[in-house]
Image (tube, rainbow, N blue to C red):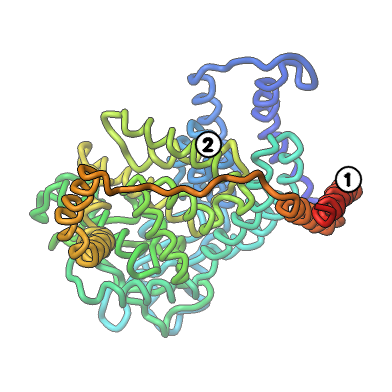
Amino acid sequence: MRRYYLRYLQILGRFLPIAAALLRDRRRFLLFGSSRRVDDDVHRDRARQVTEILLDLGPAFVKVGQVLSTRPDIVPSTYAEAFSTLQDEVPEDTGGDPFPVVEAELGDSIDLETVEPVAGGSLAFVYTAIYEGEQIALKVRRPDIVPLIERDLRIIRRLIPLIAMFADERHQYSLENVAHDFEAIILDELDFEREATMMREIRANFAGTDQVVVPRVYSDLCSERIVAMTYVDGEKVTDDDALAEAGLDATEMATLIARTYLQMGLVDGVFHADPHPGNLSVTPDGRLAIYDYGMSQRLTEREQEDITALYRALIRRDVDGLVTTLVALEVLDPSVDRVAVRRVMELVIDNLEGRSEITWRTIVTELFTTLREFPFRVPPNVMLLVRVGTVGEGVCRSLDPQFDFLAAIRSFLVDHGIVENELEALFATLRTDVRSSAPVIAGLPARADGVLGQLERGELVVRTDSVESPSPQLFGLGYAILSSAFVLSAALLTFHAQPYEVVSLAIAAAFFALFVRSRRSGSRS
């Protein structure tokens, strides 16, 4: 317990100077005073400091930074961009040496003398080894990492209410759920059996293509702490020489990456959510190899439909469809003022259309920055898809600075019939309307000629009924409807803390009295 509190104080001590600076932006003297304006350079410097603190505090905070890089509902875009640079580079001794895990679990199955280190991350280490005459890769969880992660997650959970005290009201909707989101994503990464399952599913989905390589899992060597897979040789996709040797140009590889991730998210429903250059490589024969499936996710059929609808709405600039989809995805609270959101969305689209260059990151930043005015959050599945889009686009544009990610999305939607199907449905509706209207349209000239002839001969007469003043009975009906409406309102308001139902009942009684009076006057007449 002593270590827990020491760690808690260490974390508070690291973040307090940054927290004090941010609070001073709102109140110059922390508790009172006017707000102060801070230029972008200061915010960029602070974002860099926070990024370094997260890296120093270890793997749990590295993961928190990676998650926050796709949470514009919580952090401003300047900080999100800085956090997006965080990779799994932590001190070698964090979480202990993983080699004893290999000895304990695979000592009888593989030749330990063939085990060689390849790379290290915040949660695991990667080795190569020889198994049954073949070279395999072993992703091995650091032995002491789980208790460290769980301790830091408990501290983060306790810090959230403290942060919420100083947060704007519109951010509290997101903060209520953020600790759970962090925990779900990070604990999923620690579950190596889950990772092996996800790899098998994604590999099966790409079985029909020779352009993408997903390592094969050796199930008999896998465990809670080890994922064993085929070793796939390759160089980083951002290595120009490797691309040239494989006979690919940068634009081809960028297009392949974009379409591969769209296939996973929109068609297969199981996707790899960490497409940074360290996890993507080009093989000597020109294929895309994908590594490290710890950060991966499965979508429900409904989520797939909603996310496809989101892409469709963005491509078609369908504001109503966009608002409806954001509510369905639980990004926006169902009680949100849709008229106000729609107005804001129209401004966002107008603003984007005025720009010479539009990127996926620009759309996401503009969209979520604008939505900060409303109660909204980014659920974990949506957040991971946003991460895939922003990180994936970054990789594609590092390959080809002119790469149009949105054009790749549009092309994919057309190729898979997601957009064409809607156009065909629209044309089918138009064809039906034209077919049913054709006889009427064909007879219009003859009818028009007949009506004009009647006008010329003075035979066309227009009859109108005299308009009488409304009867007392009609007024009585209106009073009865209004009285009933306020009685229903009173019933609903009884659940409210304030006694508003009394006022509603009084109004209902007044309209009822008017109803009775109108009935009496009607019977006398």
SS for callout 1? helix
- Mark 1 = which residue? 503
Q: What residue is at 53 percent from the left and 45 percent from the top?
A: 71
Q: What residue is at 38 percent from the left and 46 percent from the top?
A: 390
Decide which of 365, 414 is in the foreground and name it: 414
Instruction: Tell me if mark 1 has few (under 14), some (14-19) or many (20+) residues whose alpha carbon lies within 10 angstroms of its own.
Output: few
- Mark 2 = which residue? 51
CA–CA distance in space, label 1 to label 2: 55 Å
SS for callout 2? helix
Picture coordinates of residue 128, whole percent (x, y): 34, 67
Is 23 situated above or below 181?
above
User: Which sits earlier in the primary sequence, circle 1 or circle 2?
Assistant: 2
Instruction: Tell me if mark 2 has few (under 14), some (14-19) or many (20+) residues whose alpha carbon lies within 10 angstroms of its own.
Output: many
> Is residue 3 something one can see in this rendering?
no
Q: Amino acid at mark 1?
A: Val
The answer to whether residue 299 is left or right of residue 208 is right
Decide which of 141, 367 is in the foreground and name it: 367
Q: Quadrant of residue 228?
A: bottom left
Picture coordinates of residue 427, whole percent (x, y): 22, 61
